Image (cartoon, rainbow, N blue to C red):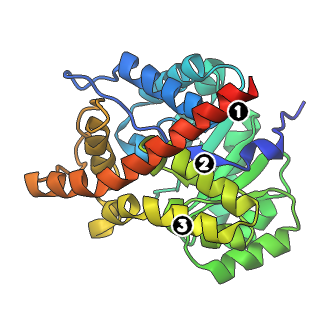
Amino acid sequence: MTVRIDPKLLRTVHLVPLTAFDATGQIDWDVQSEHITRMYAAGMRLFLPGAGTGEFHNLSADEIVELVRITRDAAGDDAVIFAPVGYQIGHAIDVGLRSVEAGANGILFMPLGHPHLSDQGACAYYRDVLDIVQMPALIYKKGPIPSDALLLELAEEPLVAGVKFAVNDMHSFRKIVLADEGEIEWLCGSAERFAPFFMLAGATGFTTGAGNLCPQLSLAMHAAFAAGEYQEGLRLQQIILPIEEFRARDGESYGISMLKYAMTLLGTNFGPPRAPGRTLTAGECTQIDELMRPILAAEAELASEFVSVGLSAK
């Protein structure tokens, strides 16, 4: 029997949690669990543990499965979890199967890194993994392969639930959304910098790394655009943008180290990113201190409103 996922569950913010390492360089279960609990309490419901911002390329198969298990235990039964898979096909199948046993609702095909890519080979890869894992899948597009034509072909596969589209060409994205005619969910894979434009073109959700620091702002921004409140959505985006603009420096090489340092401003130490992740200078840390002040203030204000609404609803 084909396992499906309710498309409505994908129409939200997809959080890629940071991965916490202890002093020995191993996954810090306590810090990771506490972080997921906080993110869930803030309203996050869809998690991509161990994906890009979670240092996918620095993790072993066992560690990815461990992160899935921690996320399920901390977030509870109603959270939606997609486990990242990639590398050679045996690795992808192994991680996929064990992640499902650990509590994943499906798998996220990470961008293919093979030096000799083709649509034909990519198609065989996706289908071979799905034939064995037999769970809903998201496909991450960050380059020419998979092509738009292949994505439309894969959209007809019962197990393909959506595409995380991270090629920032709005015209191409709009064309593929229209051509698909609502078969699957089309999602912004380029976070808050591009999410407004993707959502205007038909995306129903977006991926976030900044949401580790400001989940209320990310969720409120999504809600505003989903409701057609574009000015409010853009106002919220402007608050978050300094995080994303800093992360985008030098070929996006600050994407993880910036967030990990900024988490220390909230009193949580995730440890440094594993090599070859970037190390920050003292001057860069000072810049992050300054840019985070107004963001954290805005997040705290929204968080207090969120708690007030929750209490009044009771």
The residue at 70%/72% (across/down) is 200
Q: Quadrant of residue 4?
A: top right
Q: What amino acid type is highlighted by mark number 3?
A: Arg
Element at badge 3?
Answer: helix
Residue at image mark 1 = 133
Q: What residue does disc 2 label?
A: 219
- The quadrant where residue 244 appears: bottom left
* Kind of residue indicated by mark 1: Val
Label 1 Cα crowd, 10 Å radius (few <14 / some 14-19 / many 20+): many
Name the residue at 75% across, 68% down. 202
Q: Is residue 10 left or right of residue 64?
A: right
Q: Residue at x 55, y 74 (%)?
A: 168
* Location of mark 3 (residue): 235
Q: Residue 95: x and y, percent?
A: 55, 30
User: Could you tell me the amino acid type at mark 2?
Assistant: Leu
Question: Could you say which is closer to the camera, residue 15 or residue 54?
Answer: 15
